[in-house]
Image (cartoon, rainbow, N blue to C red):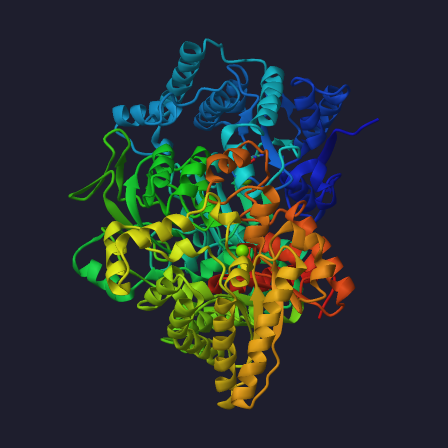
Amino acid sequence: MAKYVYFFGGDKAEGGESLRNLVGGKGAGLADMVNLGIPVPPGFTITTEVCTYFYDNDTAYPDGLKEEVAASLRKVEEIMGMKFGDPKNPLLLSIRSGARASMPGMMDTVLNLGLNETTVKGLSVLTNNEWFAYDCYRRFVAMYGDVVLGLKPQTKEEHDPFEEIIDEKKKARGVTLDVEFTVEDLKDLVARFKDIIQSRLDVTFPEDPEEQLWGAIGAVFSSWNNDRAIAYRKLNGIPASWGTAVNVQSMVFGNIGMDSGTGVAFTRNPATGENVFYGEYLLNAQGEDVVAGIRTPLPINKMQKGNGSMPCLEEEMPERYAELLKIRQILEKNYRDMQDIEFTIQKGKLWMLQTRSGKRTAFAAFKAAVDMVKEGLITKEEALMRVDPEGLNQILRPIFDPKEKEKALKEDKLIAKGLNAGPGAATGKVVFNAEDAESWAAGGEQVILVRIDTSPEDIRGMNAAQGILTSRGGMTSHAALVARQMGKVCVAGCVALDIDYKEKTITVKDKKIKEGEYISLDGATGEVFVGQVKTLPSEVLRVLIDKTMKPEESTIYKDFELLMQWADEARKLGVRTNADQPGQAAVALAFGAEGIGLCRTEHMFFEGERIEAVREMIVSEDIEGREKALAKLLPIQKSDFVGLFKVMNGLPVTIRTLDPPLHEFLPRTEKEIHELADKMDISFEKISAKIASLHEANPMLGHRGCRLGIVFPEITEMQARAIFEAACEVKNGGIDVKPEIMIPLVGHVNELRLQKDVVDRVAGEVFGEYGATLDYKVGTMIEIPRAAITADEIAEVAEFFSFGTNDLTQTTFGMSRDDAGKFLGYYVANDILEYDPFQRLDEHGVGKLMQIGVELGRKQRPDLKVGICGEHGGEPNSVKFCHRVGLNYVSCSPYRVTVARLAAAQEAIKQGSNK
Ligand code: ADP
Ligand code: MG
Ligand code: MG
């Protein structure tokens, strides 16, 4: 018989990490902790298989589930010495979601379940604490009303309806905190909550604990498909088929007096990655108070509070703090990773409620991974696997220019200070809800999303914003958590701000900031400024590129360098860059590029006066005219190559011959045409006619690539001459040069043969003139399907291949990138395509052609060097694919070189192969 329920509690648990797919992350963590001897309230996990069944069978449950649940519940009752639904000694339960991959706050939880008009009285007598019993009750009714019965805000301006009633009550009673309510206030809240549920939803709040239990279980399963969970899954690539587990667990109470409390902590700082215990807690509170960011919590230890005057757990409950420190160590050792933990203290006893691998900024992931290698906790390979290549770019993000910040301070632009919840610098216009953030951002605006407390519903808006600012909630609020994972700048718990959603204003002291005004957030310090503050490059860039900082002055840089060194040891793929200018090439070299994989010569044609010579060449009617114009271009192009070869200092430089259709170089406006006509002493009409004659219906498939060099060999000739003259000169000057001439858009071997003949002939001529020789290669781009499937024929001539996957994607799909915007977005949104093939390589189609190309090419020429130079060369998934099909190198834009190096290392480690 199938097993649907796994028990944990006492000193033994059935589940654990090895059963994560069945019991989910939360269930696995709870079970592991029980088996590690850490105190955990007893409970049981209903598996993800039940969730799948639930969705496949119109929300029904499999046979036998009810019995298994009842049996497990009896075990919990036994351990706790209480009974579910008992009028005198009622056991209360928490019903919690928990998928395989953690999705913080995206699904639902119900606490204090089992309370009704009878059991609440029992609880109150039992604990001799009526206030506590009714505090639990009002929490339960609100949570159940929201999660299970579905009472939500009706407009985007409305706050949570239960919270609104609480706020009203506070105003009427002249108090500011929940803990200041009297028992009568709490009873009144329960009544009002039930009323609003009755009047708005037309349902009576269920009294029967059994009905409550199954209502909550069903709601948690259903929450797998709520909007925010779906949005989160999309952003994080979690399949909808996984489903969630449900954890049913005995409640423990942090709201039973000042010797009780609840908190959340990270075993290391989740924003910076530093090896310090980092957390927050509240006394006399339940977990949601900390997590949901309703009250701003207190720092866990002395170190964290700095010179603040507030209390901290280390001082208030030194023994519990010491116990937590011990658990911190046990967990880090067990999981060999930073953990995010939840705990509750009930009358001086510590209970652990959750442990999971902590969400962290890419920055912290990088820092913690490098540290853990130094601490001997993990290997270099493990460290490399833990850093998201895409996220590595966070380290390169700008920060505020200290001088500009000082100026802003002097000008009194600092309006408030909150918690430094997500590092980085962000500037944008203020918006007050997620919907506006999305639509403004879609309109090209940079926005800062300002919320009292963000709820998980806001994730799409958070994703669209440059930064997030909240007036409530701490470092561990969902807002902060999700922001960090997204790599967003976040300042949380900025209590000085009075935020009004309806008026769309922030009031702080005597200042008022309206929607659409600029503010700036420093996520590293928690500072909030009005207006825009200028930024400065990150430390890594200052060391590597600007050279305004010495390597030894920056710890970040040193750790970065170390990680990249490990990556280089591990990877097999070479990493080159796409660069056309010496400056770009120098940047790429600083980032670790090992050559140029694509130099687009046409970029050199646009600058300054060159374009005139180019135009003259195009407009010329005969070969003499063209050669005259090309003669003007030759020295310019040659000097470009000299610069590039010098910077590359002996590394390979792949130069592509002219690729775009000629009309791209011609003037468009009448004024420009007149100017060109005057300059060339040709009539306006004649030039206009020339432009018209060059017009193409499908320029992407038109007269471009090698087709230009074949019809006008003098163009290729000039380019080859410029390359070889430059190479000979640089070489004679004592610098090694490795040019690789690449012919674009070849579909048939004869095309390549013709162009190679021209290149080889010119090489011979130039070598004769200079009395020098050097090694060079002539190869081709593979960017037409026909080239891929006749790669063996092409490799008879080509000495190397480079996949031009931008064009290869266009020609394989038969879609033009310029026009695809009209339908590609729809395709991706509706899962017709899993992702945009122009951003991430389409492995099944385009990738298949690459595979064929590599195989056939190497069959003909076993030592054939093969690379990729499309945009995909810097996208981690595509880089990993390139490793798998056996390419020699990827080539990407300078700022993606480090991303590619790390992605290549990860795939090499994964495939278990080392250099
Ligand atoms: P999430 O998926 O948002 O982390 P949880 O299931 O962890 O949701 O529940 C949210 C909060 O409810 C927890 O942080 C915890 O403080 C509180 N909580 C959950 N289970 C219990 C319990 N058994 N006793 C007391 N508090 C609980
Ligand atoms: Mg939790
Ligand atoms: Mg191309």
Where residue 289 sits in the image (x, y, percent)? 44, 36
Residue at 57% across / 21% down in the picture? 114
The answer to whether residue 326 shows anywhere in this view is: no
Residue 270 left/right relative to 218 = left
Note whether 437 is above or below 742 in the view shown. above
Quarter of the picture for ligand 2? top right
Residue at 58% across / 13% down in the picture? 208
Residue at 37% across / 18% down in the picture? 188
The C terminus: image quadrant: bottom right
Q: Nearer the viewer, residue 635 or 711?
A: 711
Where residue 46 sits in the image (x, y, percent)? 69, 30
Residue 125 left/right relative to 413 = right
Note whether 670 is above or below 914 in the view shown. above
| Total numbered labels placed on residues in the image | 0
Where residue 854 sits in the image (x, y, percent)? 71, 59
The answer to whether residue 96 shows anywhere in this view is: yes
Q: Residue furthest right?
A: 1
Q: Nearer the viewer, residue 266 or 788?
A: 788
Q: Nearer the viewer, residue 598 or 127?
A: 598
